[in-house]
Each structure stands twice: as structure tokens, then as C-alpha cells.
Image (tube, helix red, strand yellow):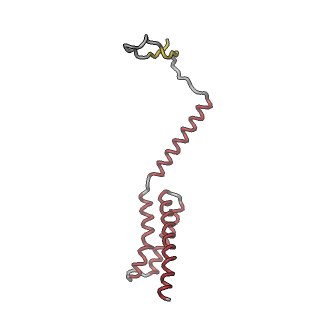
Amino acid sequence: MAVTEFVEQTETSAPVQPLAVRPATRRPISPPRHLSQQHLRQQRRLRQQRRLRQQRQTTNWTRVGALMAAGAPPVAAIPLYILGALPMSWAALLVIPLMAAKTVMIKRGSTEGRWAGRGMLAGLVAVTAYDGLRIPMACLTHA
């Protein structure tokens, strides 16, 4: 039995003509085997890339909190020392292990670690630029 598609007949059209006739089969026409294997590999690769992208987009807020907690004490140590609330030797005992933990978290290569690494690099550039201007100004005013 054949499956036939027809053009819809209107008042002004000519008699209906079949557009295409193809035999009705139960099995779809499959592409050559090498093309289908290539297609499957491509689909598998696309699924893996999508899964990796989704994993990268999820933020681990525990890591973010740990990185923030490790970054706050070095900044807070100076004002606490100036106010006399914390001796610098005690601050060093707290800051050094936190910096080691932070370095390990950055080196692991997580998304949050990359954020922290970029932030640390930007902070070092900013401090270097600030000191590059501050030191000559201080020398000029005290000379």
C-alpha cells in the first residue's frame, strides 16, 4: 500500500495531483553505518560538554564561604593590631595556616578557586600600583 500526499484543492486549483509516493514500510531508512556511528559520537560528546558546563555553573557556597573566611583575617589583622586588640604574633599564628588552606583550595582548580586566584592577582596588582605611587610621594614630602 502506498502513502500519498496531496495538495489541498481550492476552487481555482486544477485537479489534485500526488506530490510524492513512497511505499509504506515499518522500518525507517537508516543512514550508512559509519555516519550513524559518527553521529552517535558527536551526540555523546555534546552531552558530556553540556554536563560539564552545568557542573561548572553550579556554585559551591561552602567553598566561597571558606575562601572568604580565609581572606578576611589578614585584612583584619592590621586594624586589630593598631587598635591594640590583637598582637601581630598571634595574628600570624591565625593567618599563616589560613593562607596555606586558601592556596590549596585555589590550586585544586575549582570555579571558586579560579575566582579567588584572579582576585588575589588583581589585589597584588592594585597593591603594587598603590605602593609604586605612595612610596615616591612619601619620600618627596619627607625630603
Q: Is residue 57 above or below residue 22?
A: below
Q: Residue at (60%, 31%) from the top-left corner?
A: 35
Q: Residue at (50%, 57%) from the top-left corner?
A: 110
Q: In the rendered picture of this protein, how many numbered marks are placed on residues?
A: 0
Closer-to-camera residue (117/139): 139
Residue at the extreme front:
12
Q: Is residue 115 above or below residue 19?
A: below
Residue at the extreme bottom:
143
Closer-to-camera residue (139/64): 139
Q: Position of residue 128 (x, y in %)?
A: 51, 73
Residue at the extreme right:
34
139 displayed left or right of 11: right
Q: Is residue 29 above or below residue 83?
A: above
Q: Position of residue 15 (x, y in %)?
A: 43, 10
Q: Position of residue 6 (x, y in %)?
A: 44, 15
Q: Position of residue 61 (x, y in %)?
A: 41, 58
Q: Residue at (54%, 38%) from the top-left corner?
A: 43
Q: Is residue 83 above or below residue 108?
A: below
